[in-house]
Amino acid sequence: MLTVSSVEALRDQVAQWKQQDNIIGFVPTMGNLHAGHLALIDRAKQAADKVVASIFVNPTQFGPNEDFDSYPRTMDADSEALVQHETDLLFTPSVETMYGTGGQTMMVHVPDELNDMLCGVSRPGHFNGVATVVSKLFNQVQPDIAVFGQKDFQQLAVIRQLVKDLAFPIEIIGHETMREADGLAMSSRNNYLAEQERQLAPHLQKALLELTEQIKTGRQKTETAIKNTLKQLEENGFDVEYVEIRRQSDLKTPELGDNSLVALVAAKLGRTRLIDNCLFELE
Ligand code: PAF
């Protein structure tokens, strides 16, 4: 695996591969890789001839009171894992390379209707930061396909709209959420959980599965089912930010006849904010 930090070295290598007609797959990450990230690499490997991964903890997607400084940085272990999964190139730009040393950067603005809901409410500016860094990375890497996890479902929707609206010639592949044996969605932030919190954390997925089951079988009205889920999570020690049912296609509130739905949740256990979601179909 080649590791490069400059855009020039990245572009030279990718251009050479493209000249040889290789399809370029890309997996952007913030590092601290776990099996969820590595599944994205494996998926990219299936769809492409050469796989580029990036590790960059992106300052513009963290709020002032969020965990940018303490976000786990584990470059050596990450690099080893990427080699094991046959990644061809690792791009590790510095903050200066991505944002320069001067004044403000040009930012991509996510439309309000996608931004001002779900995670966007408690994390203002977060998705603009994601859309901006992903646009930069797409222009630097110039991949044919890029793979993102479905765990960050709103992020995936933002990326899909970004690619459509700004005409990036890149196919976006969403990959299913990888889970621990007890159902907890894999996330770098799981490392922050204290032992007792870690034991409570799988309730998040359980609650979502019960919620979607209740709605699918029509046993409960959606509003009642959501209220019950909220109560159940609070009883298990979660500080719930939202529990919502949305359309899979655009995350808007479902209307009669919308059958491809997603249940989404964000909740805190102690100081750790967790998110999860569950896709489901109405008959
Ligand atoms: O999902 C992530 O790890 C990040 O939001 C991403 C897509 C790498 C952008 O910084």
Image (cartoon, grey):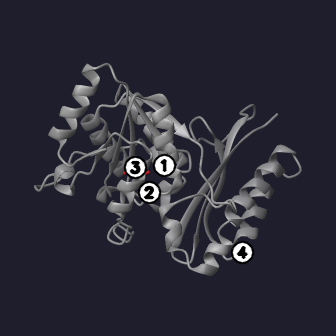
Q: Badge 2 is on which residue? A: 33
Q: Is residue 86 left or right of residue 184?
A: left
Q: Badge 4 is on which residue? A: 236
Mark 1 burial class by Cα count in 10 Å: few <14, some 14-19, many 20+: some
Quadrant position of the N terminus in the picture: top left
Q: Badge 1 is on which residue? A: 38
Q: Badge 3 is on which residue? A: 82
Give the CA distance from mark 1 to mark 2: 7 Å
Vertical order, 161 against 183 (above or below): above
Q: Secondary structure at mark 1?
A: helix
Q: Secondary structure at mark 3?
A: helix
Task: Pinpoint residue 104: horizontal percent, then vertical percent.
Answer: 17, 53
Identify the residue at image location x=43%, y=29%. 48
Evaluate if marks 1 and 2 touch, with contact meaning CB atoms under 8 Å apart: yes
Q: Amino acid at mark 4?
A: Asn
Give the CA distance from mark 2 to mark 3: 9 Å
Q: Please identify, in this view, whether the residue under mark 3 or under mark 4 is nearer the observer.
A: 3
Q: Amino acid at mark 3?
A: Leu
Evaluate if marks 2 and 3 touch, with contact meaning CB atoms under 8 Å apart: yes
Q: Secondary structure at mark 4?
A: loop
Between 226 and 256, the one lying in front of the other is: 226
Q: Please identify, in this view, whether the residue under mark 2 or under mark 3 is nearer the observer.
A: 3
Decide if residue 125 is in sight here.
Answer: no
Identify the residue at image location x=33%, y=60%. 75
